[in-house]
């Protein structure tokens, strides 16, 4: 199953910069593991915000929750989850042309 997530991050302003830097490093490392495991499929930064839109793959909502909760910044996140299904245009394209073009 595919899911579109909107993740907004609010790190406390009073957190020491060294702690913020260490948290960011741990977050990046965990995100790379999730990409390698094909759980985190794509991610885009929202301009001007500490937020992203991302596409995740999981067999269940529980599996998705476990993956997202494993991120070190999870305690500072507001997460909105939208389940995705294939659009009829994609079905029509793939039946005529094969795989959708890469982006």
Image: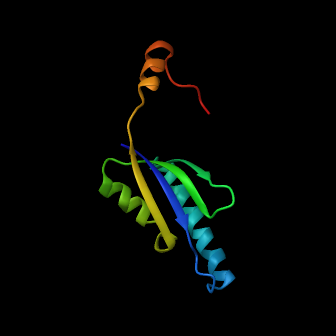
64 left or right, relative to 25: left
Q: How is the image coloured?
A: rainbow
The residue lying at 61 percent from left, 84 percent from top is: 15
| Quadrant holding the N terminus | top left
The residue lying at 42 percent from left, 22 percent from top is: 91
The extreme top residue here reads 96
Residue 60, compared with residue 90, is above or below; it is below
Residue 24: tell me if it is visible.
yes
Q: Position of residue 18 (x, y in %)?
A: 67, 82
Residue 60, compared with residue 103, is above or below; it is below
Please tell me which residue lies in front, 74 or 49: 49
| Quadrant holding the C terminus | top right
Residue 71: tell me if it is visible.
no
Residue 96, compared with residue 61, is above or below; it is above
Please tell me which residue lies in front, 28 or 88: 88
The residue lying at 46 percent from left, 74 percent from top is: 75
Q: Position of residue 47 (x, y in %)?
A: 68, 55
Q: How many marks?
A: 0
Q: Position of residue 7 (x, y in %)?
A: 51, 60
Residue 95, compared with residue 14, is above or below; it is above
Which quadrant holds residue 65?
bottom left
Which quadrant holds residue 62?
bottom left
The residue lying at 41 percent from left, 66 percent from top is: 69
């Amino acid at each position: 199953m595919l899911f579109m997530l909107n993740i907004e991050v609010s790190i406390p302003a009073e957190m020491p910069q060294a702690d913020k830097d260490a948290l960011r490093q741990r977050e990046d490392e965990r995100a790379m593991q999730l990409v390698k495991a094909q759980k985190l499929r794509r991610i885009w930064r929202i301009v001007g915000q500490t937020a992203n839109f991302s596409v995740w793959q999981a067999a269940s909502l529980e599996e998705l929750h476990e993956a997202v909760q494993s991120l070190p910044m999870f305690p500072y996140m507001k997460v909105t989850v939208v389940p995705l299904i294939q659009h009829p245009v994609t079905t029509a394209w793939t039946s005529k042309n094969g795989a959708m073009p890469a982006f």
